[in-house]
Image (cartoon, rainbow, N blue to C red):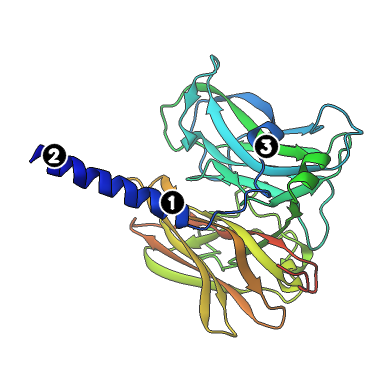
């Protein structure tokens, strides 16, 4: 019996080996190796947190830095961004104390915000192989920001925020055939549920996790109130936005507040959702614990002639108004006319 089992196992191993040999090999030339990826970490803070800071009301820390050791290093290609909360001894703390963090790379333009962001439920982002956000190797070429968050009354902590950027230099980027991504922000612009008597979102500061180009309302605050119950909101993407410049979407990062359930990029012309991101929350629904994101080398093609919409669902299970946002950070390749071959 033992001999038969041994023969059977050998046949299984042989079949598995043959299957591996017959499977097509993936090209790896465009995948950066660890030796080519450099990292730069910056610490913002410390900040003393001894009271409740709900969304967008906590202390804000900013720092301008030069990414790369020398200002004449040529262009740099940022492939990832991550954030961590630490105490005075450097020990990791819960991300519940981070409202959002972001880095602006170089000089944004109308069609490219050059922005990478971290927010609740997703403490890192990494672009698919072969893509990166390009920034010139100049002094002060990265603007960092972090804002504290605290939903607990009895907190007394000194916290700092570690922001890390992963990047390749120009030579390594050429070696791996990296292609540049541009950043486009689209968001739901909903009216407050009760703007006269309880405009809870207007008291938020100006440092919102959704800086918008003029075509989307410029300085408009994208916070809105959600009354008790389940509600759906949507906004048409302005034709002057960077999305309608065309190209291919390779990465999408979402931003929702607690009690948000989903957000979609919807093609109104085709009548279908191009991508829907869902979120999970803790038992008390105060914190986002698991957040979807989109990452693909093939990507989603955007037709400039189509109409697009951002749709979101919130389920407010409390008995009062809650604050909300529904933002998509979209990272696209391709020239403005969308003619670049994929």
For the residue carrying disc 2, how many other residues have a C-alpha within 10 Å: few (<14), some (14-19), or many (20+)? few
Q: Does dot 1 land on a helix, a strand or a loop?
A: helix
Q: Position of residue 64 (x, y in %)?
A: 79, 33
Q: Quadrant of the C terminus?
A: bottom right
Q: Nearer the viewer, residue 208 or 111?
A: 111
Q: Nearer the viewer, residue 295 or 109?
A: 295
Q: Which mark is residue 75?
A: none
**Numbered mark located on residue 20 in the image:** 1
Seen in the picture, residue 41 relative to 244 is either above or below; the reply is above
Rate crowding at label 3 as few (under 14), some (14 to 19) or many (20 or more) other CA atoms within 10 Å: some
Q: Secondary structure at mark 2?
A: helix
**Residue at x 46%, y 52% (from the top left corner):** 21
Q: Which sits in the foreground, 167 or 330?
A: 167
Earlier in the chain: of badge 3 and badge 2, it is 2
Using the numbered discs, state the Cα–Cα distance from disc 3 to disc 1 in whole angstroms: 33 Å
Task: Judge by depth and name the residue closer to the eye, 3 or 100.
Answer: 3
**Residue 340 as seen in the image, left or right of residue 226:** right
Instruction: Assess whether mark 1 and mark 2 are in contact (beta carbons under 8 angstroms).
Output: no
Residue at far left of view: 1
User: From the viewer's perspective, is 310 left or right of 144?
Assistant: left
Please give the name of the residue rendered at 74% of the width and 67% of the height, measured from the top-left corner.
242
Label 3, on which residue?
A: 166
| Image depth: mark 2 or mark 1 in front | 2
In the displayed image of the protein, which residue is found farthest to the top?
89
Front label number (3 vs 2): 2
Identify the disc placed on residue 3: 2
Q: Residue at 63%, 60% (x, y): give it.
A: 250
Q: Earlier in the sequence, mark 3 or mark 1?
A: 1
Residue 73 falls in image quadrant: top right
Neighbourhood count class around disc 1 (C-alpha, 10 Å): few under 14, some 14–19, many 20 upward: few
């Amino acid at each position: 019996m033992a001999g038969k089992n041994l023969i059977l196992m050998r046949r299984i191993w042989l079949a598995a080996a043959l299957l591996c040999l017959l499977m097509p090999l993936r090209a790896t030339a465009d995948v950066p190796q660890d030796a080519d990826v450099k990292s730069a970490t910056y610490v913002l803070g410390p900040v003393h947190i001894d009271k409740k800071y709900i969304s967008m009301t906590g202390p804000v820390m900013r720092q301008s830095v030069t990414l790369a050791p020398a200002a004449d290093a040529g262009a740099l290609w940022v492939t990832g961004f991550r954030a961590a909360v630490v105490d005075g001894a450097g020990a990791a703390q819960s991300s519940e104390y981070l409202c959002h963090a972001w880095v602006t790379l170089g000089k944004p333009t109308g069609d490219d915000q050059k922005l990478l962001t971290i927010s609740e439920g997703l403490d890192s982002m990494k672009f698919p192989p072969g893509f990166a956000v390009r920034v010139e190797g100049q002094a002060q070429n990265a603007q960092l920001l972090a804002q504290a968050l605290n939903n607990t009354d009895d907190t007394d902590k000194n916290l700092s925020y570690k922001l890390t950027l992963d990047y390749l230099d120009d030579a390594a980027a050429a070696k791996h055939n990296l292609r540049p991504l541009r950043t486009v922000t689209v968001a739901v612009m909903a009216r407050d549920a009760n703007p006269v008597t309880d405009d809870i979102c207007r008291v938020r500061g100006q440092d919102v996790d959704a800086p918008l180009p003029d075509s989307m309302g410029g300085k408009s605050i994208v916070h809105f109130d959600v009354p008790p119950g389940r509600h759906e909101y949507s906004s048409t993407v302005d034709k002057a936005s960077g999305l309608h410049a065309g190209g291919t979407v390779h990465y999408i990062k979402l931003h929702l507040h607690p009690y948000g359930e989903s957000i979609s990029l919807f093609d109104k012309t085709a009548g279908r959702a191009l991508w829907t991101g869902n979120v999970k929350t803790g038992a008390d629904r105060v914190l986002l614990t698991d957040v979807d994101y989109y990452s693909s080398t093939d990507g989603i093609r955007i037709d400039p002639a189509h109409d697009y919409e951002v749709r979101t669902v919130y389920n407010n299970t409390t008995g009062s108004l809650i604050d909300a946002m529904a933002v998509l950070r979209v990272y696209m390749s391709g020239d403005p006319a969308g003619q670049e071959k994929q």
